[in-house]
Image (tube, rainbow, N blue to C red):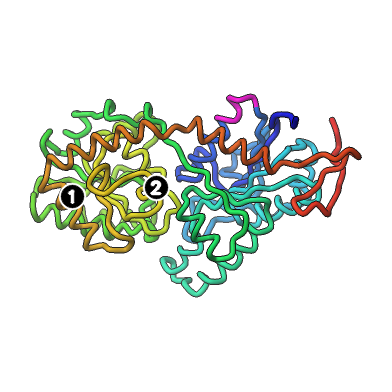
Amino acid sequence: MASELSRVCIVTETYAPEVNGVAHTLSTLVNGMRDRGIQVQIIRPRQNKLDKDDDVTLTLPGLPIPGYPELKFGLPYYRRVLNTLTRFRPEAVYVATEGPLGWVATKAAEKLGIRVISGFHTNFHQYGKHYRIGALENLGYRYLRWFHNTTSATLVPTSAQASELTAHGFERVRVMARGVNSRQFSPDHRSPELRAGWGAQPEDLVLLYVGRIAAEKNLQLVLRTYEQLRSQDDTVKLVLVGNGPELQGIRERHPEVICAGVRRGEELSRFYASGDIFLFPSLTDTFGNVVTEALASGLGLVAFDYAAAHEHTQHEKSAMLASFGDEKAFIRHAASLLERPNLLRTIRLQARQLACTISWDSIIDEFTQHLSAARTEVTENGFNETASGKSRVSVPQS
């Protein structure tokens, strides 16, 4: 019988304390594996000048990602990655992002005969049209397909995403869902004091958005929805939690909108729980961790019927779901929650109940099973086989 998984390397362009869905998912997985006694090494770009390497982290120079200046893509330091993998001797490598750093990590792991699993966390190929480089969309998709098909498997968060990628020629696509911490995100954190600071009375409706304030997140739909509901009831409030390139423009055009910036930890939990309706207008997310956090916080979700919303909710039972891209229906569904308070109350209750069934513990176990299934197999001769079974390179022993 094969021994239990003991050493894993994670390669990623983003990691905590950076604030985004990929960083949050990876830090949750890493902490869960370490709690299970698995040694985890992180290879990532250096986040600031004070970043230092340690026994479990290799940081490399990077450059800002176009459109995401707060994030960096790691430069392809092949030799340093190869030496690090050689010393650590992971049984599997998980490459979470497809940039130059992920590419050299895949090549280094191949040389050492270490199996690689990749994750499809972000639809970067769809972002081009939002940053005036739409002509690169097809090229980006072709690169992503080539990159992921060089790995043993590609993990995606939903069955719909798996079907889409498979239909576009991606091979060995596997579904690994996402969880939510229903203790951290809970209606128990609702704060009357915070709501009062927003100018909201107990009976007033507060719309909430949490995420990057950027074009690819479709924030203009949030603003149009808010304007429609405010035309019906001038006590409606809108709270935006997050940062991004569109934030300053929103502040200038809508000075009455509460722009709270980035919030973390217990403070973020209070912001979620103190809202009433959560607007998720994105058409580009692969999942949307903020959706499950909103459900756990007992909010009435309005979203398009895809990604996390499609995976976990039902229309008019635990959320209000518009057909993909139907923005008029999105606004209409939000307005119906303003007009039908009993429906909103029922949806919020059902949202909380279903979120309590989505555990990270089972997801972490599933992740380790994927890694264990794809990890290197040691032959009787002491060599490690690559995914293709052709390249054999001995790995130094400690």
Badge number at residue 311: 2
Q: How crowded is mark 1: few (under 14 residues within 10 Å), some or many (20 or more)?
A: few
Q: Quadrant of the N terminus?
A: top right
- How would you classify the magenta stretch by its main secondary structure? helix
Q: Nearer the viewer, mark 2 or mark 1?
A: 2
Marks 2 and 1, how far apart at CA: 34 Å
Q: Which of 184 and 5 is in front in this view?
A: 5
Q: Is residue 33 magenta?
A: yes
Please say whether residue 376 is one of the residues in the magenta stretch. Answer: no
Q: In this view, does 286 lie to the left or right of 365?
A: left
The location of residue 40, given as percent across then percent down, is: 65, 33
Q: Residue at x 31, y 51 (%)?
A: 280
Among the two numbered marks 2 and 1 on one chain, the one whose residue lies closer to the N terminus: 1
Q: What residue type is labelled 1?
A: Glu
Q: Is residue 138 above or below residue 370?
A: below
Q: Can you name the residue that lies furthest to the front here?
A: 1
Relative to residue 166, is residue 56 drawn left or right? right
Identify residue for label 1. Answer: 256
Q: Nearer the viewer, residue 328 or 310?
A: 310
Magenta range is: 32-37
